[in-house]
Amino acid sequence: MISLFLAIACSSTIALIFKITETGKMNRYTITCFNYLTASAISGLFIALQGIPLNFQGNWFNLLKTVLVAVSDSTILTESHGFVWAVTSGGIAGIFFFCSFIFYQISVKKYGAGISGAFAKLGIFLPMILSVVIWREIPSRFQWIGMGFAGFALLAVNIPSMKSLKSLRFSLLALFFWGGMAEFSNKIFQKYASFDFKPLFLLTTFCSAFVYSVAVLVYRRDIPIFRDIIMGIAVGIPNLFSSFFLIDALARLPAAAVFSLFGAGTIVIINIAGMVFWKEKLNIWELVSIIMTVIGIIFVALSG
């Protein structure tokens, strides 16, 4: 349980740091860039300390072809193939992580840390839905109820703005989508590869997200300043350790309970901190959305 509590604390810290950065009008792209650079460096250190092999035999194209065949047959990959899968899937996952972080910061600025944190954790329902479609993993009765509450939460937060399509809260919907796809990338990796390659997957994910961040900085011609760099490092540390402690919790507790308590706990802490430190006030529909999210997550926990 200690690992789960630490994962919740790290996840909450990310949203609260975003609140500070958006209040201070810092450059979110610089912060995202150095966040992923820091997470990549720590991930690489973990791999070096654990002695995970980073070599493989054979032609890369042939290995990738074999991986795709194994994926189509839903079989666990061998060690050399697992290496290719970790690097390939991590490279794609980096896109999802980068986009989710950008929309997380935009949402925090527009709507506050509380509702943004709720939608960031609401994304766990997207891999559940996709798992039904792709792998025919039929949810239990409680999981269906949980997904129903998630759908109502998405609807409730947009009810005040439904008078005009232009006024819909697209950044929150984008946060839900990209955050959910980031979680789904973890699901895809774990579906076919050995758990031993998780650190390599995380390293590749953070490195690729860093590359995308640098590309955006160059395109925008933004020049990083010291303040933004420091805040990026400050985000990168809890970002990495949130995943680190979450993986440890998953190894000790049922996955459904871990993800559910992780999501609900983070939402509660973010909202309490938002009200205490920034005097954030939620309108009735935002409050209903958060409550539905927590209830939905709890129902998923009951299914485990």
Image (cartoon, rainbow, N blue to C red):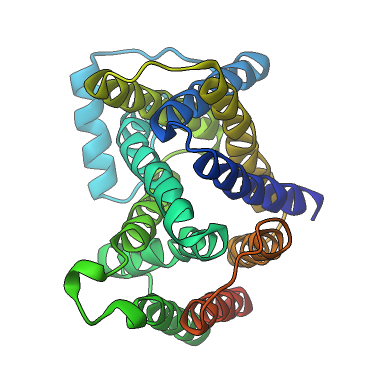
- Residue 110 higher or lower than 19, as above or below: below
Where is residue 161 drawn, in percent x and y? 30, 77
Task: Report which quarter residue 159 is drawn in.
Answer: bottom left
Q: Position of residue 73 (x, y in %)?
A: 26, 50
Seen in the image, is 177 located left or right of residue 72?
right
Placement of 31 over or under 167, stated as above or below: above
Report the front residue among 267 and 7: 267
- For the question of whether residue 191 can be seen, the reply is no
Q: Nearer the viewer, residue 157 or 196?
A: 157
The quadrant of the image that shows the C terminus is: bottom right
- Give the residue displayed 22% in from the left and 22% down from the top: 219
Picture residue at 61% right of the left edge, 77% below the top: 298
* Residue 59 image offset from top left, x and y in percent: 23, 14
Residue 140 left/right relative to 219: right
The tally of labels here is 0
Tell me the quarter of the picture where residue 216 sits: top left
Looking at the image, which residue is at 27% across and 22% down? 215
Viewport quadrant of the N terminus? bottom right
The residue drawn where x is 45% and y is 46% is 105
Q: Is residue 252 left or right of residue 297?
A: right
Left/right placement of residue 139 relative to residue 174 reads: right
Work out whether 1 lies above or below 93: below
Report which quarter residue 43 is drawn in. Answer: top right
Residue found at the far right of this picture: 2
Note whether 75 is above or below 90 in the view shown. Answer: below
Q: Position of residue 226 (x, y in %)?
A: 55, 16
Say whether residue 250 is visible.
yes
In-front residue for pair 154/299: 154
